Amino acid sequence: MRRVLLVLLLGLLSGFGPIAIDMYLPALPQLTHDLGIGASTAQLTLAVCLGGLAVGQLVSGPLSDRYGRKRPLLGGLALFVAASLACAAAPGAAALIVLRFVEGLGGGFGIAISRAVARDITTGRALAGFLSAMMLVNGLAPILSPVIGAQLLHVTDWRGIFVVLAGIGAAALLGVVLVLRETLAPEQRRSGGFDDVRATTKELLADRVFLGYLVVLAFSFGAMFAYIAGSSFVVEDIHGGSPQLYGAIFALNGVGIVCASQLNRYLLRSHSELTLLAAGVVASACGGFALLAVVVAGIGLVGIVPSFFVLVASLGMILPNATALALAPHPHVAGAASGLIGIFQYAVGVVAAPIVGIAGTHSAYPMAIVIALLGGASLVALRHVRNVPEYAEPR
């Protein structure tokens, strides 16, 4: 029972990104009107939260290597709760923008440290299976969060959504206190300061195998961000689909991630992490290439929707296996390694998302090209890992 509760807790923590961002999306028009701001300013509150999530992962990883997992995690969650309540009381757009960054910063602690905790207690195929189990929980976050946010607007306003976010953070904080035991023993902790963090980062980035998996994760995640940024315009503006149709497609793809991650758990009994990762990367690239071909041929939604599904569902096999393979050789710096994974993922996503909209809302070409290029780059990166002479797959 404790292990089940731990999976649920870590899954919730690793889902703080979509929880903090997606639950808030339905309230953007109301917030824009209430604060008297433009749409671009309202969207900036999303961008700074995304930046905070990235920075939070980069900072919290080394901190958890030095002070243990639990104390930094408690501090990050407390920051998330306080910032969410402050967002609910924000007097204007400027304050909200600053507070959203702080909220994301606290949420980033949960994302990075949850992966480090998983590495502390498992490794190899067991780690990949554990991460797949976590995806059963965090895979539901992007599906349910916008729906919950929309329903909350029937009984409250955008400020009330931030109160709910604070409540979710408080529940996670209580869960850490009651369920999570410290997983990094004092004798395994790093004792150095900034110089040690810099040396650790340099060492990790010099590891060609780790860097290869890092790039696979970043490019695959970037393709996902490109899909999130452009899919609604493709479905609704270009092909005339309703918001309800787009919501159904988005939810179906989210279910695809969950199902693929659980299939991955089953297949790990008889196949290696690398084999399943390769299958996921190939599927993702095929989805991206198919999407580009469909857009060029002008086939329409009948071809776009299946391409989206293959692209998104493949992450259910890519994320747990690539993360497990990247973290397995680095047990004593799992926090720093997890932080680097997070910052690279979000960095590629932040770059990819604006490019998708370079042609406005009237062409699907930029989105299809970006997704296809990132899928191809993931294939190249995985091939690089396989060709490293000192490569040895952990068990």
Image (tube, rainbow, N blue to C red):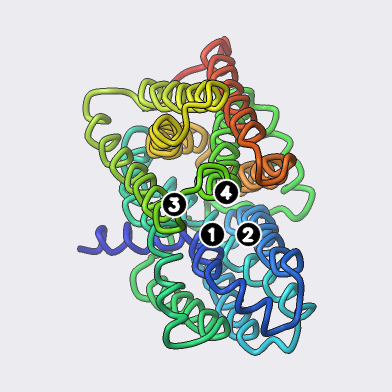
Foreground residue among 170 and 353: 353
Q: Amino acid at mark 2?
A: Leu
First-in-chain label (2 vs 3): 2
**Tag 1 residue:** 17
- CA gap, disc 2 to disc 3? 26 Å
Q: Residue at x 56, y 81 (%)?
A: 158
**Tag 2 residue:** 53
Q: Amino acid at mark 1?
A: Gly
Tell me if residue 168 can be seen: yes
**Tag 3 residue:** 246
Q: Residue at x 45, y 33 (%)?
A: 304
- CA gap, disc 3 to disc 1? 21 Å
Residue 244 percent coordinates (x, y): 40, 58
Up the image or down, 149 lies above or below 375; here it is: below
Residue 193 percent coordinates (x, y): 75, 55
**Tag 4 residue:** 237
- CA gap, disc 3 to disc 4? 11 Å
- CA gap, disc 4 to disc 2? 30 Å
Relative to residue 71, is residue 175 drawn left or right? left
Q: Amino acid at mark 4?
A: Asp
Where residue 265 sits, quadrant-wise, is top left
